[in-house]
Image: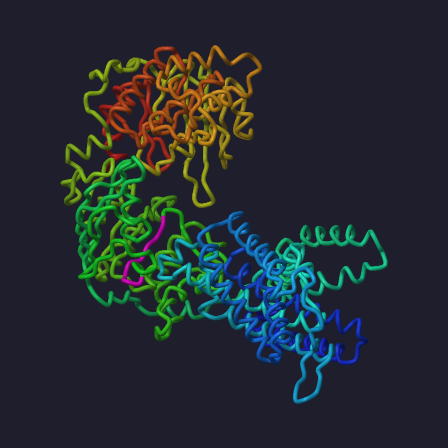
């Protein structure tokens, strides 16, 4: 079937199917006996709650296990108003839904600020509060006895009766279904999906997640309140026992079994959850067992729900539609519209501190419209923290951020975005469940003329040539980068912040990206770029600001920055390799005459190693040899592939190709715990100690695989790192950064490794702590421990190492003794371009 024809058929066929289904339900209910009338009413009420939960869970991505509380609230409001106050049902019912919606909005205020199990606990607590309120507020709710004698409403003087109420409930459920379909296709529905898929990215295009989640909670709770309003007259009484917690679980199952985010999902789920127990009624005491087993079977065979499975099968039959409007866009020369206001960025004295860590201090920079201003620096310099302050994700402790004439410091991210600041991320943050086109449309102004044509022009401008109807989550890495930049440009920003856009791209793709960024700047946008690829930075930047340990150490034109002594020291370390004394210990030069181990006598042999993370390979066929008792350094700029190599050797990342041979045994296919058992231990970047456990517990876990006593080795570690002895029974998460790094190394040594992998041990540490740490590493080298060391302090690392490799773009561009690498221009080129 032609895809576009099939899509058109689907657009008109689905509403007709729903109309026919509701008409059949109304016809059946109109002539069925009283038992089936009550069953159909139960299906309609359950579907109504499910539709509301689908707004919350399916669109906004928020879980609630407390919707029985809103259901009970609606039932009690109708019962109290109609029985106690003698109000009309037709007044009580809207009030029930309104009050439930208001309570949902109030519950959202604390609920939306927590995630995962904490969100579930907040909603569960609400359900229990409503239940206890119904029990204790006896003067209004009747306590445990509840409210009896709830009459059924009349319309135009005629009593509706149970059948009339059931028909009305079906009609309301049908209207709610149409309402959900309209919402899912609306801009508000798209905003809910955006917050669900990538909340940070949603804020960066001007969406307020708190407001959007609050609306979702209110709509969802309102539906549950209306359903409860039907329950009261249908049952004739309400008691606290009618609204047990198990009912909330069934409401969640309605959405999950039927299919989240699908229009038909709650209807199918309600039919199964209500009708299946009735069908199994003849099994007596075994029916709950069979009901549970069948539910598990459905969830196993259709994890996306029944509607999701049917929809996926239908899409496979139709195939994917072409995007003719993109082809039309390619036929014309596209120019990016200039920002509405050409304004520059002025940053003065910007600073922020996290606990005792001064991440950024008194940073100043100026970025002009029509220019690329790059922010560079080694790991831990504060670059991304600076971007997060500029984008409104961090509130600065000091300083000013001025765009044009408006101060932005302290504003939330969504307000900063609306002020003209767009943002991309180091790891792309697309809305994966939305199409490429919808990712751009949600970022455009709601009143933008010809938004689809504008989106098409932007996709062509950035170089995207794929199908605009594809789900963004299915795109390859390069296209994800392009679409994210196009989405940022859809906001027509004054300032564009880019965080490592070249990460994971091939050299050819980086050249295309460089040309794109230059064209964006030439259109009048103020571009601020954080990037580790020095060749790209030096090639396109008009102005460069260099950060180190949160401080600005240099600024100027590319060539001026490249030659700056402070910049060279920040990237390459002290030039006096192997000569200086440090603290009370000295770091001597490694065995300068040591030569590369041959494959025959190497302890570790890596051959043709290719590895990546779904995009193009990060490592491009590496060959590495490490001999027994050697200390080998792996040097290179951020993003060169050093950590990927370490993770591949340690078994934390499965290589795409190549071999990792250790002591004659192949490790590339083994999981990480089996690699540790062979004697290869990684001390990962960022320490990653177990923060809730004590120092002693961390050390004991380091020797978990050993069968012998650990006491002697623990004592040895405490002698090696005396500062740990004082904190032996303290939680590891309370240690300073340097102490945590010492603990991480000690924990790694506790397994008595034959090869210790150290990934950026000096990252984020103060200079005095770094000196102490390198003295400790020097002692390890003197003890003939075999080490592979990755560290940003290139000078100090070479002072320790016997040999070194220089990595650039996933390839080894130089290797040799420490002295040879220190004198080789390849190292400087890898770091500074």
Q: Residue 185's x, y, as percent?
A: 50, 70
Q: Residue 110's x, y, as percent?
A: 45, 55
> Residue at coordinates 18% horizontally, 46% vertically from top-left?
349
Q: Residue 308's x, y, as percent?
A: 62, 60
Find residue 256 and report its image quarter: bottom right
Q: In this view, which residue lies farthest toward the bottom?
A: 156
User: Is 674 situated above or below 833?
Assistant: above
Image position of 611 (left or right of 577) = right
Q: Residue 703's x, y, as percent?
A: 51, 19
Q: In the rendered picture of this protein, how many numbered marks are placed on residues?
A: 0
Nearer-the-camera pick, 117 or 587: 117
Image position of 431 (left or right of 373) = right
Find residue 147 and report its image quarter: bottom right
User: Is 785 included in the stretch rendered in magenta?
Assistant: no
User: Is 215 situated above or below 411?
Assistant: below
Quadrant that contains the C terminus:
top left
Residue 667 visible in the snapshot: yes
> Residue at coordinates 33% horizontally, 26% vertically from top-left?
738
Provide the residue span drawn in magenta. 418-425
């Amino acid at each position: 079937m032609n895809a576009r024809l099939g899509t058109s058929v689907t657009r008109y066929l689905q509403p007709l199917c729903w109309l026919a289904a509701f008409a059949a339900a109304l016809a059946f209910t109109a002539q069925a006996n009283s038992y089936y009338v009550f069953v159909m009413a139960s299906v309609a009420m359950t579907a109504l709650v499910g539709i509301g939960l689908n707004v919350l869970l399916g669109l906004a991505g928020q879980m609630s296990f407390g919707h029985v509380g809103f259901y009970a609230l609606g039932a009690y409001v109708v019962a109290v108003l109609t029985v106690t106050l003698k109000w009309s049902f037709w007044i009580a019912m809207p009030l029930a839904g309104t009050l439930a919606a208001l309570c949902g909005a109030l519950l959202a205020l604390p609920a939306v600020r927590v995630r995962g199990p904490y969100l579930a606990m907040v909603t569960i607590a609400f359900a229990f509060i409503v239940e206890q309120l119904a029990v204790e507020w006896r003067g209004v709710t009747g306590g445990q006895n509840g409210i009896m004698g709830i009459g059924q409403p009349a319309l135009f003087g005629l009593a509706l009766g149970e059948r009339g109420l059931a028909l009305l409930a079906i009609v309301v459920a049908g209207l709610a279904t149409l309402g959900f379909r309209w919402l899912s296709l609306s801009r508000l529905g798209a905003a809910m999906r955006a917050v669900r898929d990538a909340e940070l990215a949603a804020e960066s295009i001007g969406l307020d997640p708190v407001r959007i989640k609050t609306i979702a909670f209110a709509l969802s709770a309102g539906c549950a309140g209306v359903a409860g309003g039907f329950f009261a007259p249908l049952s004739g009484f309400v008691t606290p026992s009618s609204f047990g917690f198990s009912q909330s679980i069934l409401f969640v199952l309605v959405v999950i079994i039927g299919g989240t985010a699908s229009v038909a999902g709650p209807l199918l789920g309600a039919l199964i959850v209500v009708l299946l127990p009735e069908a199994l009624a003849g099994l007596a005491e075994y029916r709950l067992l069979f009901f549970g087993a069948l539910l598990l079977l459905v969830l196993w065979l259709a994890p996306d729900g029944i509607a999701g499975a049917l929809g996926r099968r239908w899409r496979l039959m139709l195939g994917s539609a072409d995007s003719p409007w993109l082809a039309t866009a390619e036929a014309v020369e596209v120019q990016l519209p200039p920002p509405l206001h050409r304004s520059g960025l002025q940053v003065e004295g910007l600073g922020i501190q996290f606990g005792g860590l001064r991440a950024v201090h008194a940073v100043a920079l100026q970025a002009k419209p029509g220019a690329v201003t790059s922010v560079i620096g080694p790991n831990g310099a504060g670059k991304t923290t600076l971007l997060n302050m500029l984008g409104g994700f961090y509130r600065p402790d000091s300083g000013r951020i001025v765009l044009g004439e408006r101060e932005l410091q302290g504003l939330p991210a969504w307000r900063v975005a609306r002020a003209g600041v767009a943002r991309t991320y180091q790891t792309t943050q697309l809305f994966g469940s939305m199409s490429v086109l919808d990712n751009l449309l949600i970022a455009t102004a709601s009143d933008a003329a010809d938004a689809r044509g504008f989106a098409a022009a932007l996709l062509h401008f950035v170089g995207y040539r794929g199908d605009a109807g594809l789900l963004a989550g299915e795109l390859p890495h390069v296209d994800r980068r392009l679409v994210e930049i196009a989405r940022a440009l859809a906001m027509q920003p004054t300032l564009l912040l880019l965080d490592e856009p070249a990460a994971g791209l091939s050299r050819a793709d980086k050249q295309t990206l460089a040309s794109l960024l230059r064209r964006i700047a030439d259109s009048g946008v103020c571009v601020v770029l954080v990037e580790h690829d020095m060749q790209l930075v030096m090639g396109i930047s008009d102005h460069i600001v260099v950060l180190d340990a949160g401080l600005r150490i240099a600024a100027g034109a590319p060539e001026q920055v490249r030659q700056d002594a402070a910049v060279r020291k920040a990237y390459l370390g002290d030039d006096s390799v192997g000569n200086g004394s440090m603290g009370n210990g000295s770091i001597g030069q490694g065995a300068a005459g040591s030569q590369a181990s041959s494959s025959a006598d190497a302890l570790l042999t890596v051959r043709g190693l290719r590895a990546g993370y779904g995009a193009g390979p990060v490592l491009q066929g590496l060959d590495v040899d490490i001999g027994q008792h050697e200390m080998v350094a792996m040097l290179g700029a951020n993003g060169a592939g050093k950590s990927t190599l370490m993770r591949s050797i340690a078994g934390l990342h499965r290589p795409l190709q190549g071999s990792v041979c250790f002591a004659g045994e192949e490790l590339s296919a083994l999981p990480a715990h089996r690699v540790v058992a062979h004697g290869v231990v990684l001390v990962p970047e960022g320490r990653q100690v177990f923060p809730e456990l004590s120092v002693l517990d961390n050390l004991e876990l380091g020797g978990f695989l050993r069968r012998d006593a650990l006491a002697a080795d623990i004592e040895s570690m405490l002698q090696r790192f005396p500062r740990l002895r004082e904190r032996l029974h303290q939680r590891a998460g309370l240690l300073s950064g340097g102490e945590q790094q010492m603990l991480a190394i000690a924990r790694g040594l506790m397994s008595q490794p034959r090869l210790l992998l150290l990934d950026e041990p000096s990252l984020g540490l103060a200079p005095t702590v770094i000196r102490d740490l390198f003295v400790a590493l020097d002692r390890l080298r003197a003890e003939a421990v075999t080490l592979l060391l990755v560290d940003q302090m290139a000078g100090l690392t070479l002072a320790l190492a016997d040999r070194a490799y220089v990595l650039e773009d996933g390839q080894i561009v130089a290797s040799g003794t420490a002295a040879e690498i220190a004198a080789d221009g390849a190292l400087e080129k890898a770091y500074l371009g």
